[in-house]
Image (spheres, rainbow, N blue to C red):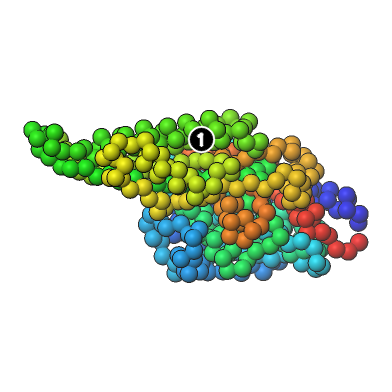
């Protein structure tokens, strides 16, 4: 069979799996696979892959990553026992380039959405927590390898499906695989980009600001220093830093045309004081900052501190601490002419998708591939970001099928196909 015919056969096979895909997705949504509770859903996809003739392997999380610079501490430690990622190999019959298809099985909690884990289908639309972020993408990757196998495609390079946990909490699932040598010549990460091709990721950094003052009775207010007022001053300086970034670092080819501003600084939490008529001597503020690949994460950390030192008053300068102890995701970009980006663009066109290349304005596991393993990566997948994490999360079945075709055709092109 010639290559063009083989590609058409694979695409047609994926269309033929539409109803199966809908059933699998609804099945996966029924598992409330929030952090610490992912293994039921992982076992379900493992069973499906085995039934399809694959040999998936459960790779336990490696606790030694807790000392890795890219490790993200948990808000509530879920424990390591019994938790792992699923690695499913396929192909590797020659010496073609290897590829990882990464997708995450963990989801954010239901919130006030009572039917979050009771999937509903109306025509081509499937609702439920994780439909878009990212169980729809996991299903698309599964369909891709299933169709390749059923069509007898012999990939020259090795393809590995990485079905991971812990994405929503910072990426320790993918980190664990990459840090233990599960790497390849390229990777595609399934996230709900609306099937836009994203070879770049915005960075995201959480910060913890503490200001200290001198407590005093309200009647003695001139002898006190309010830590809340000093924190307000520091916040105003940080917002000025945000405006500086927007003014000077927003003009980036991957990000300039996005509908939402990808640079922002958010103050999310504040704790201070214990009595209405007492000057508070300590204020704790937590927030996040988003920035583009033209800013190094270490520079952002240093500059935020330096701005407060330079622009704060005499007291603030010596009485604040700015720490970065939780989420710390650097930004990255893969050049648009990189062979992996060209390959994914070609596969998108062949899959009937537009060749839409842009930055991804939220952070995800993709960053870990270049940072931990020096690998090129592209984020692309079905579902709309606006639906992710919402109380009305949904996805269109057709989007999943188109993504599956993109993944399968990209794998054929990147890994190469052996035989006639
Ligand atoms: Zn996601």
Number of numbered tags placed on the structure image:
1
The residue sitting at 45% across, 47% down in the picture is: 301
* Residue at 71 percent of width and 60 percent of height: 185
Q: SS of the residue at dot 1?
A: helix
**Residue beneath label 1, please?**
245
Q: Residue at x 54, y 55 (%)?
A: 105
The residue drawn where x is 54% and y is 64% is: 176
Is residue 347 found left or right of 269 in the rendered image? right
Is residue 232 visible in the rendered image? The answer is: yes
Q: Residues within 10 Å of mark 1 (few under 14, many from 20)?
A: some
User: Which image quadrant: the C terminus?
Assistant: bottom right
Q: Specify whether 409 is left or right of 249.
A: right
Q: Position of residue 106 (x, y in %)?
A: 51, 54
Across and down, in percent, residue 386 comes to 54, 36
Q: Among all residues in the image, which is located at the extreme left?
A: 219
Residue 108 visible in this rendered orientation of the protein: no
- Classify 182 as above or below 356: below
Q: Position of residue 311 (x, y in %)?
A: 37, 35
Q: Position of residue 294 (x, y in %)?
A: 59, 42
253 w.r.t. 409: above or below: above
């Amino acid at each position: 069979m010639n290559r063009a015919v083989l590609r058409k056969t694979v695409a047609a096979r994926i269309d033929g799996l539409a109803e199966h895909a809908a059933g699998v997705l609804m099945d996966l949504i029924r598992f409330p696979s929030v952090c610490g509770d992912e293994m039921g859903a992982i076992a379900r996809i493992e069973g499906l892959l085995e039934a399809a003739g694959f040999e998936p392997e459960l790779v336990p999380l490696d606790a030694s990553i807790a000392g890795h610079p890219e490790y993200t501490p948990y808000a509530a430690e879920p424990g390591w026992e019994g938790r792992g990622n699923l690695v499913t190999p396929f192909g590797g019959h020659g010496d073609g380039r290897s590829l990882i298809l990464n997708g995450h099985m963990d989801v954010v909690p239901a919130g006030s959405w009572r039917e979050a884990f009771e999937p509903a289908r109306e025509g081509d639309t499937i609702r439920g927590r994780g439909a878009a972020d990212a169980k729809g993408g996991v299903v698309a990757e599964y369909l891709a390898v299933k169709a390749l196998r059923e069509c007898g495609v012999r990939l020259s390079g090795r393809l590995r499906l990485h079905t991971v946990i812990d994405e929503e909490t910072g990426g320790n699932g993918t980190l664990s695989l990459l840090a233990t040598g599960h790497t390849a010549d390229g990777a595609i990460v399934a996230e709900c980009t609306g099937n836009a091709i994203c070879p770049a990721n915005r960075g995201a950094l959480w910060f913890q600001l503490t200001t200290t003052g001198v407590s005093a009775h309200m009647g003695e207010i001139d002898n006190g220093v309010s830590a809340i007022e000093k924190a307000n001053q520091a916040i105003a300086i940080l917002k000025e830093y945000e405006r500086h970034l927007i003014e000077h670092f927003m003009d980036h080819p991957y990000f300039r045309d996005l509908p939402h501003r990808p640079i922002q600084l958010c103050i999310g939490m504040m704790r201070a004081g214990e009595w209405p008529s007492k000057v508070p001597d300590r204020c704790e503020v937590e927030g996040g900052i988003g920035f583009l690949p033209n800013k190094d994460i270490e520079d952002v950390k240093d500059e935020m501190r330096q701005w407060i030192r330079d622009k704060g008053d005499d007291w603030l300068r010596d009485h604040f601490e700015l720490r970065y102890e939780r989420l710390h995701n650097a930004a990255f970009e893969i050049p648009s002419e990189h062979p992996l980006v060209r390959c994914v663009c070609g596969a998108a066109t062949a899959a009937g998708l537009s060749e839409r290349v842009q930055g991804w304005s939220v952070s995800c596991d993709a960053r870990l591939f270049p940072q931990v393993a020096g690998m090129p990566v592209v984020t692309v997948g079905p579902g709309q970001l606006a639906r992710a994490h919402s109380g009305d999360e949904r996805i269109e079945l057709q989007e999943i099928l188109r993504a599956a075709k993109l993944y399968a055709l990209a794998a054929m092109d990147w890994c190469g196909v052996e035989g006639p």
